[in-house]
Amino acid sequence: MNNLQLGSFVLNGQLILYLSCGAAGWLILRHRLRNLPEKNSVLSYTLDAIGLWVIVWKGSYLVFHFVEFIQYPLSLLYFDGGVKGRWLATLAVLAYIWYRFSKLNLSFRVMVDIGVWFTFAGWTVYHVLLVIMSDHPAWFHSATAGLTVILLITMFISQIRTKNLKGIQFAIWFLIGNITLLFLVTERPLWLLSFSKQQIVLLVIAGFLTGWTWLDEKKQKGVFHE
């Protein structure tokens, strides 16, 4: 996303995009966690995580472009660490969230459920904004946003009816759906066989969640004994 011109002001388009995603995720958690005793703590940590992500993402410019920063320090205001910076920020936030949530004694399933609600809301806003800003391919952003909205609605209805946490199952379908949609993007850079890096990452996460779900179900049935 390019910078946005509002009169004499130039706004960082990417920063607005990411903050909008974070705000959407936080707002949906504020609604969904209203009956969770740890609601205030979770919302507070989530807000901290959003700020941490932005700081690490912007600050990663120092790590990956240190020479350019030394030559022109103000470049930090206009540039960031790019794709590597986003990955670094995401890893930092995951570590922070895991540490904070574990202190609340939340189960892994609850953590994933919270993460799924946040991700689905943010992902939807992200791709809707890219469509509005005419980012290409527009059909892909529209399809991804549509898929996520359908999963959001289905998950909302499902949890009203059963009161069970099914975030992991919906996360797996979300990952599979995005992997499939990426196959239709012909200009994507291939990394392994006919998969892009993004598809491989999504596939690994889907495999991990599937394996954990299988093991958890076996444990619940008493197949594994401590």
Image (cartoon, grey):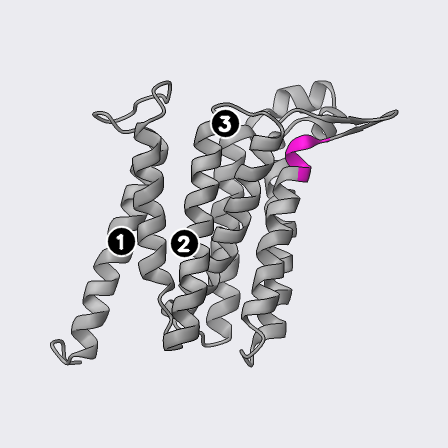
- Residue 205 image point, x, y percent: 31, 48
Residue that label 3 marks: 138
What amino acid type should be assigned to the residue bearing mark 3? Answer: Ala
Classify mark 3: residues with Cα within 10 Å, few (<14), some (14-19) or many (20+).
Answer: some
- Residue 42 image point, x, y percent: 57, 68
- Residue 173 image point, x, y percent: 31, 51
The mark nearer the N terminus, 2 or 3, is 3
Main secondary structure type of the part rendered in magenta: helix
Would you place residue 56 above or below residue 194 in this image?
Answer: below
Quarter of image, res 157: bottom left
Task: Give the residues drawn in magenta, as a range.
Answer: 12-16
The residue located at (31%, 53%) in the rendering is: 172
Residue farthest to the right, as pictured: 8
Q: Secondary structure at mark 1?
A: helix
Residue that label 1 marks: 208
Q: Is residue 197 left or right of residue 106?
A: left
The mark nearer the N terminus, 1 or 2, is 2
Whether the magenta-drawn stretch holds residue 225 is answered as: no
Q: Who is closer to the viewer here, 99 or 44?
A: 44
Residue that label 2 marks: 151
What amino acid type should be assigned to the residue bearing mark 1? Answer: Phe
What amino acid type should be assigned to the residue bearing mark 2? Answer: Leu
Q: Is residue 168 visible?
A: yes
Kindly report the distance in space between the C-alpha atoms of the residues bearing marks 3 and 1: 30 Å
